[in-house]
Amino acid sequence: MKGIFSPVAICVAGALLTACSSSSVQHIEKQASADAVVTHYADIAEAVYGDSLTTAKTLRHAIDAFLSEPTENNLQAARQAWIAARVPYQQSEVYRFGNAVVDDWEGKVNAWPLDEGLIDYVATDSYGTQSDINALYTANIIASKSLMIGGERVDTTHITPELIANKLQEADGIEANVASGYHAIEFLLWGQDLYGTNPGAGERPATDYDLANCTNGNCDRRRAYLEAVTDLLISDLEDMASYWQEGGAARMALLDQSTDAGLATMLTGMGSLAYGELGGERTKLGLMLHDPEEEHDCFSDNTHWSHYYNAKGIKNVYLGEYQRVDGSWVKGASLSDLVATQNSELDSVMKDKLNTTEAAAQAMVDAAKQGQTFDVLIALNNTQGNQLVQTFVDSLVNETRSTEEIIRLLNIQGIALEGSDSLDNPSAVF
């Protein structure tokens, strides 16, 4: 980090003039410790995005096996590979807030919710046939050899990663026109979840990809889309993984700042994900509206795990640790260490709150094992389910309050945590 020198070097230089005071040594050591915390934060990012890339490649292999032999068993294996790929990626989202390099990129891989009629066939009795704000609401790329986008006729004969990235993603400037990333792949593997707030996920048949026994038409183009969008995900993750390696754009942007700015980045990520994004937009909003369309992993009903690993990512940053997909650990200097040297009680409180949040997330995971997935938990008359979700929201809010105390303790200036109308101005939601 800029402006950080070793205590030894400072004292040796200073000895020519005067002895180093104990207070100046303590200040330098504290700065050096903070520098190590920020550097280790980058090391965890390198590991988590590396794992995201590895699991995306494993997903591609599972999709290859499925397309080679489009059976229900092979489709299920591809779905499980998608769920496994979400484990490291969801732990990376704490890096989105505060790191402009990540935030500018994130929409390519994790944008949601999406108007799935842009990509493939939908059940129009529940989805509808048109939208007042999206002319491509039911464009069905897979069934179309060309589309009008932004007043231009776009040739979609050949579905390639370049076509998806450059022409189809956020077509017409509409955020809901999500053509790339995890959720586009999720829709292609599961199809629509037509169960509302009742138990059940998407049930796309394997024969949607079977050239010899094709259902719902255009199996060749559906196969091409699935291959292209998965290759694009891998390419995008390759970029981000490289950005956190030595000399990479994200690592350099972080480490070229002052130490305080690096700590601000870390705390912004923790607080903004916990409060505005996860606690508000991804959880409380759906609970308020009792609307399964607000579910993050809505086609697969994997939202309980998505939320669990988002919360885990916040905990990782505070504790300075991350368990890789191969079972090994990345551990080092942490915010927890830094806080404990100044206020051990606050550090203990923060760790307790992180554990409380994890327990609340685990309760939703346990409910999902009994058929009470997130969309079921938020149903209008599911009092017990609603309370499980509210407990998770409350834990995230309480956790954020301690994050704010840490910001004050460390005297970090200029942090603005993300908010959400669902938490800050509920009347605006309706």
Image: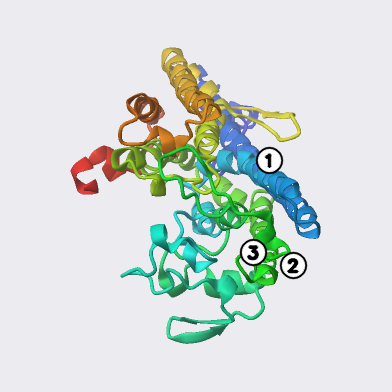
Residue occupying image coordinates x 59% and y 37%: 41
**Drawn side of residue 234 relative to residue 5, left or right:** right
Badge nearest the viewer, 2 or 1: 2
Which residue, given by chain and number where applicable, does mark 2 sit on? 211
Amino acid of disc 2? Leu
**Drawn side of residue 107 relative to residue 291, left or right:** right
- Residue in the foreground of this view, choosing between 35 and 167: 167
Marks 2 and 3, Cα distance to the nearest angstrom?
9 Å
Which residue, given by chain and number where applicable, does mark 3 sit on? 215
Mark 2 element type: loop
Do residues under tags 2 and 3 come within 8 Å of each other at their CB atoms?
Answer: no
Give the quarter of the figure containing the N terminus. Answer: top right
Q: Residue 17 location, x and y as percent?
A: 55, 29
Q: Residue 85 location, x and y as percent?
A: 66, 44
Residue occupying image coordinates x 53% and y 39%: 306
On the question of residue 235 being in view, the answer is: no
Marks 2 and 1, Cα distance to the nearest angstrom?
39 Å
In this view, 202 is above or below 108: above
Which residue, given by chain and number where applicable, does mark 1 sit on? 47
Residue at the top extreme, as displayed: 345
Amino acid of disc 1? Ala
Q: Residue 86 location, x and y as percent?
A: 61, 43
Of mark 3 and mark 1, the one earlier in the sequence is 1
